[in-house]
Amino acid sequence: MANKKAPAKMEDLLRADNFDFSTVQILDNDGKVVNEELMPELSDEELVTFMEDMVFYREWYNRTQALSRQGRLGFVAPTTGQEASQLGTIAATTEDDIIFPGYRDLPQLMQHGLPSYKAYLWSKGHVEGSTYPEDFRAYPPQIIIGAQYVQTAGAALGIKKNGRKAVAMTWTGDGGSSQGDVYEGMNFAGAYKAPAIFVIQNNGWAISTPREFQTAAPTLAQKAVAVGIPGIQVDGMDILAVYAVTKAAREYAIAGNGPVLIETLCYRFGPHSLSGDDPKRYQPEGAQDEWRQRDPLNRYRKFLTEKGLWTEEKENEVVENTKEAAKEAIKQAESTPKQKVSDFLKNMFETPDYVTQEQIEYYEAKENK
Protein backbone atom coordinates (compact mmCIF):
# COMPACT_ATOMS: atom_id res chain seq x y z
CA MET A 1 0.00 0.00 0.00
CA ALA A 2 1.28 3.46 -0.89
CA ASN A 3 2.73 5.49 1.96
CA LYS A 4 2.17 8.95 0.53
CA LYS A 5 -0.92 10.84 1.59
CA ALA A 6 -3.50 11.07 -1.17
CA PRO A 7 -5.00 14.44 -2.21
CA ALA A 8 -7.46 15.69 0.38
CA LYS A 9 -10.19 16.72 -2.08
CA MET A 10 -12.15 14.47 -4.41
CA GLU A 11 -12.01 16.97 -7.24
CA ASP A 12 -8.22 16.66 -7.17
CA LEU A 13 -8.50 12.88 -7.54
CA LEU A 14 -11.05 13.07 -10.35
CA ARG A 15 -8.77 14.63 -12.93
CA ALA A 16 -7.38 12.74 -15.90
CA ASP A 17 -4.09 14.62 -15.46
CA ASN A 18 -3.73 13.58 -11.81
CA PHE A 19 -0.78 11.19 -11.76
CA ASP A 20 -0.60 10.88 -7.97
CA PHE A 21 -1.90 7.41 -7.25
CA SER A 22 -1.43 7.44 -3.49
CA THR A 23 -3.85 5.31 -1.52
CA VAL A 24 -7.05 7.02 -0.38
CA GLN A 25 -7.90 6.07 3.19
CA ILE A 26 -10.39 7.34 5.77
CA LEU A 27 -10.08 4.73 8.55
CA ASP A 28 -6.78 3.30 9.71
CA ASN A 29 -6.33 -0.25 11.02
CA ASP A 30 -7.49 0.84 14.47
CA GLY A 31 -10.73 2.32 13.18
CA LYS A 32 -9.57 5.91 13.65
CA VAL A 33 -10.54 8.59 11.13
CA VAL A 34 -7.36 9.80 9.44
CA ASN A 35 -8.89 11.85 6.61
CA GLU A 36 -11.81 13.89 7.88
CA GLU A 37 -11.94 15.87 4.60
CA LEU A 38 -13.09 12.82 2.65
CA MET A 39 -15.50 11.48 5.28
CA PRO A 40 -18.86 10.86 3.54
CA GLU A 41 -22.01 12.42 4.99
CA LEU A 42 -23.84 9.41 6.42
CA SER A 43 -26.39 9.07 9.19
CA ASP A 44 -25.78 6.76 12.13
CA GLU A 45 -28.31 4.37 10.61
CA GLU A 46 -26.43 4.31 7.31
CA LEU A 47 -23.13 3.73 9.11
CA VAL A 48 -24.63 0.77 10.97
CA THR A 49 -26.08 -0.64 7.74
CA PHE A 50 -22.56 -0.91 6.31
CA MET A 51 -21.55 -3.11 9.23
CA GLU A 52 -24.71 -5.19 9.05
CA ASP A 53 -24.07 -5.85 5.38
CA MET A 54 -20.42 -6.82 5.90
CA VAL A 55 -21.30 -9.19 8.73
CA PHE A 56 -24.11 -10.66 6.64
CA TYR A 57 -21.87 -11.46 3.68
CA ARG A 58 -19.03 -12.76 5.87
CA GLU A 59 -21.46 -15.24 7.41
CA TRP A 60 -23.22 -15.84 4.08
CA TYR A 61 -19.93 -17.07 2.65
CA ASN A 62 -19.44 -19.33 5.67
CA ARG A 63 -22.86 -20.89 4.99
CA THR A 64 -22.13 -21.09 1.26
CA GLN A 65 -18.80 -22.80 1.87
CA ALA A 66 -20.49 -25.41 4.07
CA LEU A 67 -23.14 -26.07 1.41
CA SER A 68 -20.44 -26.44 -1.23
CA ARG A 69 -18.59 -29.01 0.86
CA GLN A 70 -21.85 -30.92 1.21
CA GLY A 71 -22.06 -31.11 -2.58
CA ARG A 72 -25.19 -28.95 -2.70
CA LEU A 73 -23.62 -26.11 -4.74
CA GLY A 74 -21.31 -25.91 -7.72
CA PHE A 75 -18.79 -23.14 -8.37
CA VAL A 76 -18.09 -20.87 -5.37
CA ALA A 77 -15.59 -18.00 -5.32
CA PRO A 78 -14.63 -16.89 -1.77
CA THR A 79 -15.32 -13.28 -0.80
CA THR A 80 -14.00 -13.14 2.78
CA GLY A 81 -11.76 -10.10 3.11
CA GLN A 82 -13.27 -8.26 0.15
CA GLU A 83 -16.50 -7.18 1.82
CA ALA A 84 -15.54 -3.50 2.07
CA SER A 85 -14.46 -3.41 -1.57
CA GLN A 86 -17.59 -5.10 -2.86
CA LEU A 87 -20.16 -3.46 -0.62
CA GLY A 88 -18.55 -0.02 -0.57
CA THR A 89 -18.71 0.19 -4.36
CA ILE A 90 -22.23 -1.14 -4.84
CA ALA A 91 -23.54 1.07 -2.01
CA ALA A 92 -22.76 4.12 -4.15
CA THR A 93 -25.05 2.96 -6.97
CA THR A 94 -28.80 3.26 -7.46
CA GLU A 95 -31.31 0.80 -8.93
CA ASP A 96 -31.13 2.81 -12.18
CA ASP A 97 -27.47 1.88 -12.66
CA ILE A 98 -26.53 -1.22 -14.65
CA ILE A 99 -24.02 -3.60 -13.10
CA PHE A 100 -21.81 -6.20 -14.75
CA PRO A 101 -20.38 -8.49 -12.07
CA GLY A 102 -17.64 -11.08 -12.32
CA TYR A 103 -18.00 -14.52 -10.79
CA ARG A 104 -16.83 -13.30 -7.35
CA ASP A 105 -19.37 -10.49 -7.28
CA LEU A 106 -22.56 -12.20 -6.16
CA PRO A 107 -22.76 -9.92 -3.07
CA GLN A 108 -23.08 -6.88 -5.34
CA LEU A 109 -25.80 -8.62 -7.35
CA MET A 110 -27.73 -9.46 -4.18
CA GLN A 111 -27.35 -5.91 -2.89
CA HIS A 112 -28.63 -4.67 -6.24
CA GLY A 113 -31.78 -6.75 -5.80
CA LEU A 114 -31.06 -10.32 -6.91
CA PRO A 115 -33.06 -12.81 -4.79
CA SER A 116 -30.58 -14.83 -2.72
CA TYR A 117 -31.92 -18.19 -3.90
CA LYS A 118 -31.02 -17.20 -7.47
CA ALA A 119 -27.43 -16.67 -6.34
CA TYR A 120 -27.41 -20.29 -5.21
CA LEU A 121 -29.05 -21.42 -8.45
CA TRP A 122 -26.31 -19.64 -10.40
CA SER A 123 -23.70 -21.54 -8.41
CA LYS A 124 -25.54 -24.78 -9.22
CA GLY A 125 -25.44 -23.95 -12.94
CA HIS A 126 -29.21 -23.71 -13.19
CA VAL A 127 -30.58 -21.47 -15.94
CA GLU A 128 -32.97 -19.85 -13.46
CA GLY A 129 -29.94 -18.44 -11.66
CA SER A 130 -29.25 -16.28 -14.72
CA THR A 131 -32.87 -15.44 -15.57
CA TYR A 132 -33.67 -11.90 -14.47
CA PRO A 133 -36.77 -9.68 -14.76
CA GLU A 134 -36.58 -7.17 -17.61
CA ASP A 135 -36.50 -4.23 -15.20
CA PHE A 136 -33.58 -5.62 -13.17
CA ARG A 137 -30.58 -3.63 -14.37
CA ALA A 138 -27.88 -6.27 -14.04
CA TYR A 139 -26.28 -9.04 -16.03
CA PRO A 140 -25.34 -12.52 -14.78
CA PRO A 141 -21.79 -12.95 -13.46
CA GLN A 142 -19.22 -13.07 -16.25
CA ILE A 143 -16.96 -16.10 -16.29
CA ILE A 144 -14.65 -14.89 -19.06
CA ILE A 145 -11.96 -12.86 -17.30
CA GLY A 146 -12.30 -9.13 -18.06
CA ALA A 147 -15.03 -9.50 -20.70
CA GLN A 148 -17.47 -7.54 -18.53
CA TYR A 149 -15.41 -4.38 -19.16
CA VAL A 150 -16.38 -4.43 -22.83
CA GLN A 151 -20.03 -5.04 -21.95
CA THR A 152 -19.93 -2.15 -19.49
CA ALA A 153 -18.52 0.23 -22.09
CA GLY A 154 -21.35 -0.59 -24.47
CA ALA A 155 -24.02 -0.24 -21.81
CA ALA A 156 -22.53 3.08 -20.65
CA LEU A 157 -22.66 4.44 -24.18
CA GLY A 158 -26.30 3.36 -24.40
CA ILE A 159 -27.03 5.19 -21.14
CA LYS A 160 -25.45 8.33 -22.57
CA LYS A 161 -27.37 8.13 -25.84
CA ASN A 162 -30.64 7.64 -23.96
CA GLY A 163 -29.92 10.69 -21.81
CA ARG A 164 -30.25 8.78 -18.54
CA LYS A 165 -28.59 9.96 -15.33
CA ALA A 166 -27.05 6.62 -14.50
CA VAL A 167 -23.82 4.65 -14.80
CA ALA A 168 -22.70 1.20 -15.81
CA MET A 169 -20.40 -0.40 -13.24
CA THR A 170 -18.19 -3.45 -13.35
CA TRP A 171 -15.49 -5.26 -11.40
CA THR A 172 -12.49 -7.42 -12.19
CA GLY A 173 -9.42 -8.56 -10.28
CA ASP A 174 -5.73 -7.77 -10.52
CA GLY A 175 -5.36 -10.71 -12.90
CA GLY A 176 -8.23 -9.44 -15.00
CA SER A 177 -6.49 -6.07 -15.36
CA SER A 178 -3.93 -7.77 -17.63
CA GLN A 179 -6.61 -8.81 -20.12
CA GLY A 180 -6.96 -6.91 -23.39
CA ASP A 181 -10.72 -6.57 -22.88
CA VAL A 182 -10.10 -4.42 -19.82
CA TYR A 183 -8.03 -1.88 -21.74
CA GLU A 184 -10.38 -1.96 -24.73
CA GLY A 185 -13.46 -1.38 -22.58
CA MET A 186 -11.88 1.56 -20.74
CA ASN A 187 -10.49 3.01 -23.94
CA PHE A 188 -13.85 2.90 -25.73
CA ALA A 189 -15.74 4.39 -22.79
CA GLY A 190 -13.12 7.08 -22.34
CA ALA A 191 -13.17 8.09 -26.01
CA TYR A 192 -16.94 8.56 -25.96
CA LYS A 193 -17.11 9.92 -22.39
CA ALA A 194 -19.54 7.17 -21.50
CA PRO A 195 -20.67 7.07 -17.83
CA ALA A 196 -18.90 3.96 -16.57
CA ILE A 197 -17.15 3.02 -13.35
CA PHE A 198 -14.46 0.37 -13.74
CA VAL A 199 -13.29 -1.32 -10.54
CA ILE A 200 -10.14 -3.42 -10.21
CA GLN A 201 -10.29 -5.38 -6.96
CA ASN A 202 -6.58 -5.91 -6.40
CA ASN A 203 -6.59 -8.81 -3.94
CA GLY A 204 -2.92 -9.58 -4.53
CA TRP A 205 -3.23 -12.96 -6.21
CA ALA A 206 -4.73 -14.04 -9.54
CA ILE A 207 -5.00 -17.68 -8.43
CA SER A 208 -1.26 -18.42 -8.04
CA THR A 209 0.16 -15.37 -9.82
CA PRO A 210 1.30 -12.62 -7.40
CA ARG A 211 0.53 -8.99 -8.16
CA GLU A 212 4.16 -8.14 -8.96
CA PHE A 213 4.06 -10.49 -11.95
CA GLN A 214 0.93 -8.89 -13.42
CA THR A 215 2.63 -5.66 -14.44
CA ALA A 216 5.72 -3.58 -13.75
CA ALA A 217 3.48 -0.57 -13.12
CA PRO A 218 3.59 0.58 -9.46
CA THR A 219 -0.21 0.72 -9.31
CA LEU A 220 -3.10 -0.70 -11.31
CA ALA A 221 -4.96 2.62 -11.00
CA GLN A 222 -2.45 4.25 -13.34
CA LYS A 223 -3.69 2.07 -16.20
CA ALA A 224 -6.25 4.87 -16.54
CA VAL A 225 -3.53 7.22 -17.84
CA ALA A 226 -3.26 5.39 -21.17
CA VAL A 227 -6.96 5.91 -21.90
CA GLY A 228 -7.17 9.48 -20.59
CA ILE A 229 -9.51 8.95 -17.65
CA PRO A 230 -9.12 9.48 -13.89
CA GLY A 231 -7.61 6.60 -11.93
CA ILE A 232 -7.86 6.32 -8.14
CA GLN A 233 -6.27 3.84 -5.76
CA VAL A 234 -8.22 3.31 -2.54
CA ASP A 235 -7.78 1.20 0.59
CA GLY A 236 -10.15 -1.63 -0.25
CA MET A 237 -10.33 -2.77 3.38
CA ASP A 238 -11.85 0.60 4.37
CA ILE A 239 -15.54 0.66 3.45
CA LEU A 240 -15.90 4.39 4.10
CA ALA A 241 -13.06 5.25 1.73
CA VAL A 242 -14.33 2.86 -0.95
CA TYR A 243 -17.84 4.28 -0.70
CA ALA A 244 -16.68 7.92 -0.73
CA VAL A 245 -14.48 7.42 -3.80
CA THR A 246 -17.14 5.45 -5.71
CA LYS A 247 -19.87 7.96 -4.88
CA ALA A 248 -17.68 10.80 -6.16
CA ALA A 249 -16.83 8.79 -9.28
CA ARG A 250 -20.52 8.22 -9.99
CA GLU A 251 -21.31 11.92 -9.63
CA TYR A 252 -18.39 12.72 -11.95
CA ALA A 253 -19.61 10.22 -14.56
CA ILE A 254 -23.28 11.21 -14.60
CA ALA A 255 -22.24 14.85 -14.98
CA GLY A 256 -20.98 13.96 -18.45
CA ASN A 257 -17.26 13.74 -17.69
CA GLY A 258 -16.79 10.13 -18.72
CA PRO A 259 -15.58 7.01 -16.90
CA VAL A 260 -13.41 6.50 -13.82
CA LEU A 261 -11.09 3.62 -12.90
CA ILE A 262 -10.91 2.64 -9.22
CA GLU A 263 -8.32 0.23 -7.85
CA THR A 264 -9.29 -1.19 -4.46
CA LEU A 265 -6.40 -2.65 -2.46
CA CYS A 266 -7.82 -5.65 -0.66
CA TYR A 267 -7.07 -9.28 0.18
CA ARG A 268 -8.95 -12.52 -0.26
CA PHE A 269 -8.72 -14.68 2.84
CA GLY A 270 -9.04 -17.99 1.08
CA PRO A 271 -8.46 -19.75 -2.22
CA HIS A 272 -9.36 -18.40 -5.63
CA SER A 273 -12.30 -20.80 -5.66
CA LEU A 274 -13.51 -23.84 -3.75
CA SER A 275 -12.88 -25.95 -6.85
CA GLY A 276 -9.33 -26.93 -6.08
CA ASP A 277 -6.54 -24.40 -5.50
CA ASP A 278 -4.73 -24.22 -2.17
CA PRO A 279 -3.14 -20.81 -1.41
CA LYS A 280 -0.69 -22.45 1.00
CA ARG A 281 1.02 -23.99 -2.01
CA TYR A 282 1.83 -20.69 -3.70
CA GLN A 283 1.62 -17.91 -1.10
CA PRO A 284 4.64 -17.45 1.20
CA GLU A 285 4.23 -18.36 4.85
CA GLY A 286 2.75 -15.49 6.86
CA ALA A 287 1.44 -13.71 3.78
CA GLN A 288 -1.93 -13.21 5.41
CA ASP A 289 -0.67 -11.94 8.77
CA GLU A 290 -0.36 -8.28 7.80
CA TRP A 291 -3.68 -8.32 5.97
CA ARG A 292 -5.42 -9.87 8.96
CA GLN A 293 -4.63 -6.67 10.82
CA ARG A 294 -6.52 -4.78 8.11
CA ASP A 295 -9.61 -7.01 8.15
CA PRO A 296 -12.45 -4.69 7.04
CA LEU A 297 -14.86 -6.01 9.67
CA ASN A 298 -12.42 -5.59 12.56
CA ARG A 299 -11.50 -2.07 11.49
CA TYR A 300 -15.07 -0.91 11.04
CA ARG A 301 -16.23 -2.68 14.19
CA LYS A 302 -13.74 -0.61 16.21
CA PHE A 303 -14.97 2.56 14.52
CA LEU A 304 -18.65 1.89 15.28
CA THR A 305 -18.02 0.61 18.79
CA GLU A 306 -16.14 3.81 19.63
CA LYS A 307 -19.19 5.77 18.45
CA GLY A 308 -21.51 3.60 20.55
CA LEU A 309 -23.28 2.24 17.46
CA TRP A 310 -22.32 -1.44 17.59
CA THR A 311 -22.40 -4.26 20.12
CA GLU A 312 -21.55 -7.95 20.21
CA GLU A 313 -25.24 -8.70 20.71
CA LYS A 314 -26.13 -6.82 17.54
CA GLU A 315 -23.52 -8.71 15.57
CA ASN A 316 -24.71 -12.07 16.87
CA GLU A 317 -28.23 -11.16 15.83
CA VAL A 318 -27.09 -10.42 12.27
CA VAL A 319 -25.19 -13.72 12.14
CA GLU A 320 -28.23 -15.71 13.26
CA ASN A 321 -30.46 -13.92 10.76
CA THR A 322 -27.96 -14.70 8.02
CA LYS A 323 -27.99 -18.40 8.88
CA GLU A 324 -31.76 -18.43 8.56
CA ALA A 325 -31.62 -16.51 5.28
CA ALA A 326 -29.11 -18.96 3.83
CA LYS A 327 -31.19 -21.90 5.00
CA GLU A 328 -34.28 -20.49 3.30
CA ALA A 329 -32.36 -19.62 0.13
CA ILE A 330 -30.92 -23.11 -0.36
CA LYS A 331 -34.32 -24.63 0.40
CA GLN A 332 -35.90 -22.52 -2.34
CA ALA A 333 -33.05 -23.23 -4.75
CA GLU A 334 -33.28 -26.96 -4.20
CA SER A 335 -37.05 -26.92 -4.67
CA THR A 336 -36.68 -25.38 -8.13
CA PRO A 337 -37.44 -28.04 -10.79
CA LYS A 338 -34.27 -29.65 -12.08
CA GLN A 339 -33.17 -28.90 -15.61
CA LYS A 340 -33.86 -31.41 -18.35
CA VAL A 341 -31.85 -32.16 -21.48
CA SER A 342 -34.79 -30.85 -23.50
CA ASP A 343 -34.56 -27.56 -21.59
CA PHE A 344 -30.92 -27.12 -22.59
CA LEU A 345 -31.83 -27.77 -26.21
CA LYS A 346 -34.73 -25.32 -26.12
CA ASN A 347 -32.39 -22.63 -24.80
CA MET A 348 -29.93 -23.02 -27.69
CA PHE A 349 -31.88 -21.01 -30.27
CA GLU A 350 -34.84 -18.66 -30.17
CA THR A 351 -36.27 -20.73 -33.03
CA PRO A 352 -34.80 -24.28 -33.06
CA ASP A 353 -33.44 -25.56 -36.35
CA TYR A 354 -34.65 -28.89 -37.74
CA VAL A 355 -31.95 -31.01 -36.06
CA THR A 356 -32.36 -29.35 -32.66
CA GLN A 357 -36.17 -29.65 -32.82
CA GLU A 358 -35.78 -33.34 -33.58
CA GLN A 359 -33.54 -33.74 -30.53
CA ILE A 360 -36.00 -31.80 -28.34
CA GLU A 361 -38.81 -34.14 -29.32
CA TYR A 362 -36.60 -37.20 -28.75
CA TYR A 363 -35.60 -36.17 -25.22
CA GLU A 364 -39.06 -34.95 -24.27
CA ALA A 365 -40.40 -38.39 -25.14
CA LYS A 366 -37.79 -40.02 -22.87
CA GLU A 367 -38.37 -37.54 -20.04
CA ASN A 368 -42.15 -37.99 -20.08
CA LYS A 369 -42.04 -41.74 -19.64
Image (tube, rainbow, N blue to C red):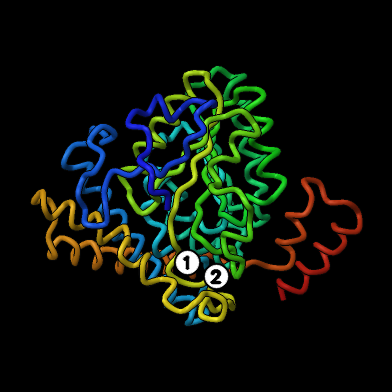
Q: Residue furthest right?
A: 354
**Dot 1, how many residues are within 10 Å of its Cα: few (below 14), some (14-19), or many (20+)?**
many
**Dot 2, how many residues are within 10 Å of its Cα: few (below 14), some (14-19), or many (20+)?**
some
Task: Please indicate, yes or no, whether residue 98 appears anywhere in the rendered image.
Answer: no
Chain-order first, disc 1 or disc 2: 1
At a point 12% along the width and 50% down the height, the residue shown is 309
As shown in the figure, which amino acid type bears the numbered disc 1? Pro
Of 164 and 6, nearer the camera is 6
At a point 67% along the width and 40% down the height, the residue shown is 183
Q: Is residue 138 left or right of residue 143?
A: left
* Quadrant in the picture for residue 365: bottom right
Mark carried by residue 246:
none
Picture coordinates of residue 26 (x, y %)?
28, 43
Q: Which residue is mark 2?
A: 273
User: Do the residues bearing badges 1 and 2 touch, measured as CB atoms within 8 Å?
Assistant: yes
Q: Is residue 281 left or right of residue 329?
A: right
Mark carried by residue 78:
1
Which secondary structure lies at badge 2? loop
Of 128 and 124, nearer the camera is 124
Quarter of the image with the C terminus in it: bottom right
As shown in the figure, which amino acid type bears the numbered disc 2? Ser
* Quadrant in the picture for residue 42: top left
Which secondary structure lies at badge 1? loop
Picture coordinates of residue 281 (x, y %)?
56, 81
Q: Is residue 286 above or below residue 28?
A: below
Q: Is residue 291 left or right of residue 68?
A: left
At a point 18% along the width and 57% down the height, the residue shown is 302
